[in-house]
Image: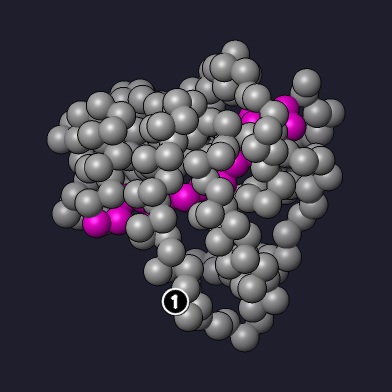
Amino acid sequence: MTLNLSADEVLTTTRSVRKRLDFDKPVPREVLTECLDIALQAPTGSNAQGWQFVFIDDPAKKQALAEIYRTNATPYLEAEKPTYGDVRDERTPLVVDSAKYLNERLHEVPVMMIPCLEGRPDGAPAGMSAGFWGSLLPAVWSFMLALRSRGLGSAWTTLHLMGEGEKQAAEILGIPFEKYAQGGLFPIAYTKGTDFKKAKRLPADELTHWNTW
């Protein structure tokens, strides 16, 4: 099922979904393939297309990945969060609460996805690092938008990459660690309801600079 949403609606209502992920409804592989076909239209540096996408629906592997994630996520989520003195502070308790919920139940999601890109930017200069991830992240965001337009949701998580986590995940999934870098861990499920709204954000005019900072 594809939702009847305009491009602007998809762009402004694609949320990081945690508490509204439906852990019980199966996600067909053909739907994920359809979303990925769309995502692969995203730009990539020099048209290299060095990306690979690992989908995980094996219960034992999902459990193992969730345990790696929790090793890093649990202390992070318990730590004191920064304050900003603006609209962002209103959402912090809710964001932390939903992140803790996902941390506890991550292994229950129907599917996980880890996007990978050929090469490793470890220690690379800022320009090279930006170019490297710029060849993967647009496709991943396009994938999340395609999910949203079909009634599915996800959340961009990176905490499993900390410490030895990325290497451990590579061993579990057979990802060639020295050859491919992982860009995150994405829980995927149908959402409970599709009535997502715009989030409260800082106004554009407070973030805009013309010709000088």
What amino acid is found at the position of numbered circle 1 in the picture?
Ala
Considering every residue shown, the one lying at the far front of the view is 60
Q: Quadrant of residue 64?
A: top left
User: Closest to the observer: 115 or 99?
Assistant: 99
Q: What residue range appears in magenta?
A: 146-163
Rendered residue at 36%/25% (across/down): 52
Relative image position of residue 20 (x, y in whole percent): 71, 47
* Residue under the point 24% across and 57% down: 163
Residue annotated with mark 1: 79
Residue drawn at point x = 50 percent, y = 78 percent: 81
Colour scheme employed for the rendering of this structure: one colour
| Vertical position of residue 55 compared to residue 74: above or below | above
**Residue 161 in view (yes/no):** yes
Q: Residue at x 62, y 86 (%)?
A: 85
Residue 150 highlighted magenta (yes or no): yes
Is 49 rendered above or below residue 84? above
Q: Secondary structure at mark 1?
A: loop
Q: Nearer the viewer, residue 58 or 6?
A: 58
Q: Quadrant of residue 10?
A: top right
Residue 23: x percent and y percent?
Answer: 65, 37
Rendered-image quadrant of the N terminus: top right
Q: Residues within 10 Å of mark 1 (few under 14, many from 20)?
A: few
